Amino acid sequence: MDKRMRAWVLEGGFGTEHLRPVELPVPEPRRGQVLVRIRAASVNYRDLMVIDGHFDRSLSMPLVPLSDGAGEVVAVGEDAHRLRVGDRVATLFQQKWLGGRPTFRTTLESSLGHPKGGVLAEHVVLDEEGLVVLPPALTFEEGSTLPIAAVTAWQALHVDAPVRPGDTVLVLGTGGVAVFAIQLARASGARVIVTSSSDEKLARAREIGATDLINYRSTPDWDARALELTGGVGVDLVVDMAGGDLRRSVRALRPGGQVSLVGLLAGASAELDVVPMLLRRARIQAISVGSRDMFEDLLRAVAHHRIRPVIHRVYPFEAAREAIEAQRRGEHVGKLVILVG
C-alpha cells in the first residue's frame, strides 16, 4: 500500500475558497533527487497572487501552493551525493538558479509554488541542487522564512548595491522582506530609516533595529523627512516594497543612490519623473529573489551575526487557509509560518 501524506491543493478555481486539504501518495525521489519531510512553510505575497489567479489564469491544477519550506532529508535518490539523510534544509525558490547570470529557464520556469508544485505538503521531492543546508541555530520555522524574503533583502543590500558601514538605508514597510532588510542593514553597520502607516508597527521596527521612524500617514512628505534626517544629503539605498509611485523614493536618494524595487503592493506599473532621476544619477534596480550562491552567502551572514528571523505568528497545518488570508490583510510584522509536521 502506498504511503500517504497530507497536503493542501488549489483546485477548481482561484481564491483561498478553492484551497482544500487532501491526502496524496508520498512521492519517491528519482536520480539526483531527495525526499524532504517538510516541517514548516512560510507565506509570501507572491503565494497570494498565485492563489488569486493574478500570476497565471491558465496554471495547471491541482496545484500544491507555497514556495518557501524547511525540513529534513528523509530519502536520497540514485546519484544524489550533495545531501544526506538527516540534513536540515530549506528550499531554493528558483530551483535552477544556482549562480551566475539568471535566465528565464533558471528563474521564471523553475520557481516553486508555480509553475512547479509547492511545499504545502508533508513531503516533497526536489532536485538536491535546489536545497540549502540550514545553520544549526535556526529552527525549521525560522528556516522556512528565508528563501524569498531574506534572499531578496540580501540581493537588494549586498549584491546590486553593497551596503557599507555608515550608509543610510530607507526601508518602506514592515513585511517579510522589509524586516530582513532592517536586520541585514543594521548588521552591516548602516543607519536604517523605516516608513509605515502604523505607529505600532514602527515601534516594533525599532525593536528589530530601525534607527529612525516615519509614519507616512502623519508625514505624507516622507521623502522630504528622509532628506531632513540625513541633513539634506539623501539616503544611499531605498528598499521599495510598493512600486507604483517611485517619485518619492527617487527624491529621497543621494546623488548616485539606488532604489531597489522588490515589490508591487501599489500596483504593476510605476510613475517616475526623469529630471529628478538625472539630477541624482539615480539607479532603479528590480530585485527578484536570488540564486543559491546568494542564499548560501546569506546563511553565512545569518550565522555570523546570529540573526533570528522575525515570525509574527505560527499557524497549525489545518489553518493554512487562515494564514494565507492573514497575508492578504497585511497586519503582520515579519513572517507568517505554517507548521506542517
Image (cartoon, helix red, strand yellow):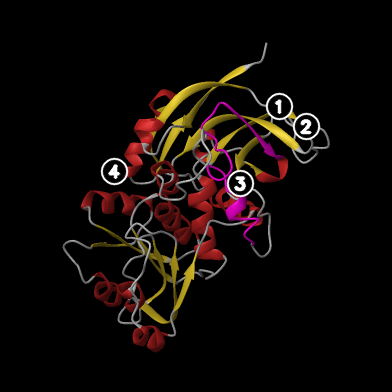
The reply to whether the C-beta atoms of the residues labelled 2 and 4 are less than 8 Å apart is no
Residue of label 1: 28
Residue span colored magenta:
103-127
Nearer-the-camera pick, 322 or 14: 14
- Quadrant containing the N terminus is top right
- Could you say where residue 282 lies in the image, as x and y percent from the top left? 43, 80
Mark 2 or mark 4: name the one nearer the start of the chain.
2
Q: Residue at x 35, y 77 (%)?
A: 272
Q: On residue 158, which mark appears?
A: none
Residue of label 3: 92
Measure how far apart labels 3 and 1 are at the Cα level: 19 Å
Measure how far apart labels 2 and 3 are at the Cα level: 19 Å
Classify mark 1: helix, strand or loop: loop
Mark 1 or mark 2: name the one nearer the start of the chain.
1
Residue 133 vs 162, above or below: the answer is: above
Mark 3 or mark 1: name the one nearer the start of the chain.
1
Classify mark 3: helix, strand or loop: loop
- Could you say where residue 333 lies in the image, as x and y percent from the top left? 34, 46
Identity, as a three-letter code, of the amino acid under mark 3: Leu
- Residue 281 falls in image quadrant: bottom left
Q: Residues within 10 Å of mark 3 (few under 14, many from 20)?
A: many
The reply to whether the C-beta atoms of the residues labelled 1 and 2 are less than 8 Å apart is yes
